[in-house]
């Protein structure tokens, strides 16, 4: 294994010393991993600095497909482990994946794990340090972050597609765009999760009692196909099963079952032992997940270009609408039944009157009409 050690491990408050220490560590890491030249040694012109470059980076239709390719982006994002995502990095996993980088491996050092990234197109590599041991308010840290942000492009080899391109923000946006898709997801996953109710955890969610009632009634409708669901007693397992997909959680593999978010790849294993654990449907998502991050989800509030919503906010709006439709359907059924009943009453009344008239006529003695 590659052994990386730092020359200075004593904490210091001097900003310049810390910055130098980080730069020294970075160059040490790169040297140990044969990733020369040093990070700050590369100077490339970026597209907006050079017109020729503009011509070079003119995107062909297949290039445009690549920058909008959600599956390719998710394939890269999926390779980033929790150790990278949950420590303070100068560049996020989402930013790296948008710039064509796959996670290769973690290289351990004394006080700082290094994430080694690679590009499958050009075989370029980028070693990303962990900033956790350093004071975030230190202004020198910003310089390190800028170096890394530029490095996301600069460390691709010359001629690589990613040298001057990066994915459009669309690739990490909320994956559902119609009510039909939302309905399919909730029905399919709700039924599947309900079938595994014996291992579902206790969930922590921000639903208020009205939203919980809406979820219950919508779930009753789709699970049991009963419109009289309005009167049915609350079933907490059913609510859990239908709430999880509203927050992006899907059931995977029924042999060794677990919950997974297909946008951030966070997982949670389900078992009888975990059943009493608390599962927070929001906090379990990773940072930058469109189900919880409105800046990543890119859903504009209806009629507004400013207010952004996150994925679960949109899904709750969908449930409210479904609930409203159910209530309307129920109301129109009631009206139709009432109408039928009114018609029946009128018919019955008419029959009764006719019968009375016949009986009356029958009871009268026969009087022949005068000739
Ligand atoms: Zn590359
Ligand atoms: Zn997520």
Image (tube, rainbow, N blue to C red):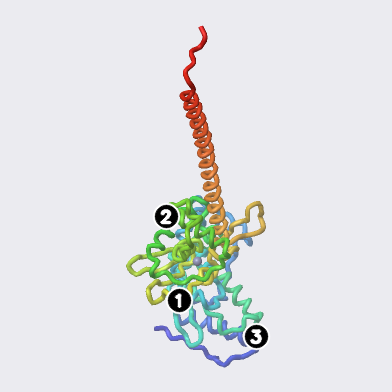
| Residue 238, percent from left and from top | 45, 62
User: What's the distance in space between the residues labelled 1 and 3, CA to CA?
Assistant: 43 Å
Please give the count of numbered marks on the rendered protein. Answer: 3
Left of 271 or right of it: where is 330?
A: right
Which of the pair 336/68 is nearer the observer? Answer: 336
Sequence-wise, the earlier of marks 2 and 1 is 2
Could one spot residue 73 in this view of the protein? Answer: no
At label 2, counting other C-alpha atoms closer than 10 Å, the crowd grade (few under 14, some 14-19, many 20 or more) is few
At 51% from the left and 44% from the top, the residue drawn is 333
| Residue 292, percent from left and from top | 55, 65
Which of the pair 182/22 is nearer the observer? Answer: 182
Q: Which residue is mark 3?
A: 15
At 59% from the left and 57% from the top, the residue drawn is 299
Which of the pair 260/353 is nearer the observer? Answer: 353
Frontmost of labels 1 and 3 is 1
Q: Which residue is mark 1?
A: 277
Frontmost of labels 3 and 2 is 2
In this picture, is 182 found above or below 139? Answer: above
| Residue 355, percent from left and from top | 47, 29
At label 3, counting other C-alpha atoms closer than 10 Å, the crowd grade (few under 14, some 14-19, many 20 or more) is some
| Residue 271, percent from left and from top | 38, 73
User: What's the mark number on residue 216?
Assistant: none
Farthest residue, direction left: 255
User: What's the distance in space between the residues labelled 2 and 1, CA to CA?
Assistant: 28 Å
Classify the position of the N terminus by image quarter. bottom left
Q: Secondary structure at mark 2?
A: helix
User: What's the mark number on residue 224?
Assistant: 2
Frontmost of labels 2 and 1 is 2
């Amino acid at each position: 294994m590659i052994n990386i050690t730092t020359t200075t491990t004593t904490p210091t408050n001097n900003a310049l010393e810390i910055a130098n220490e980080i730069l020294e560590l970075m160059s040490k890491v790169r040297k140990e991993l044969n990733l020369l030249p040093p990070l700050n040694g590369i100077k490339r012109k970026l597209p907006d600095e050079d017109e020729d470059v503009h011509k070079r980076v003119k995107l062909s239709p297949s290039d445009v497909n690549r920058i909008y390719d959600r599956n390719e982006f998710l394939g890269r994002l999926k390779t980033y482990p929790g150790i990278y995502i949950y420590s303070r990095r100068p560049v996020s996993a989402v930013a790296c994946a948008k710039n064509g980088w796959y996670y290769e491996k973690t290289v351990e050092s004394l006080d700082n794990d290094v994430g080694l990234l690679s590009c499958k197109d050009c075989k370029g590599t980028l070693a990303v340090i962990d900033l956790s041991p350093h004071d975030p308010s230190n202004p020198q840290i910003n310089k390190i972050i800028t170096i890394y942000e530029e490095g996301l492009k600069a460390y691709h080899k010359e001629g690589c597609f990613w040298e001057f391109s990066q994915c459009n923000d669309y690739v990490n946006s909320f994956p559902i765009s119609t009510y039909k898709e939302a309905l399919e997801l909730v029905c399919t996953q709700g039924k599947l999760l309900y079938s595994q109710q014996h291992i579902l955890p206790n969930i922590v969610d921000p639903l208020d009692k009205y939203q919980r009632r809406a979820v219950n009634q919508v779930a009753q409708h789709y699970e049991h196909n009963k419109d009289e669901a309005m009167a049915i007693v609350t079933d907490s397992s059913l609510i859990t099963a239908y709430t999880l997909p509203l927050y992006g959680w899907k059931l995977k593999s029924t042999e060794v079952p677990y919950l997974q978010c297909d946008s951030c790849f966070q997982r949670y294993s389900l078992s009888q032992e975990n059943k009493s654990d608390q599962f927070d449907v929001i906090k379990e998502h990773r940072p930058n997940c469109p189900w919880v991050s409105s800046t990543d989800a890119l859903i504009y509030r209806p009629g507004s270009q400013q207010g952004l919503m996150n994925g679960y906010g949109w899904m709750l709006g969908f449930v409210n609408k479904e609930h409203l439709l159910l209530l309307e359907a129920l109301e129109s059924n009631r009206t139709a039944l009432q109408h039928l009943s009114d018609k029946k009453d009128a018919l019955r009344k008419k029959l009764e009157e006719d019968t009375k008239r016949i009986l009356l006529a029958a009871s009268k003695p026969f009087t022949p009409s005068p000739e």
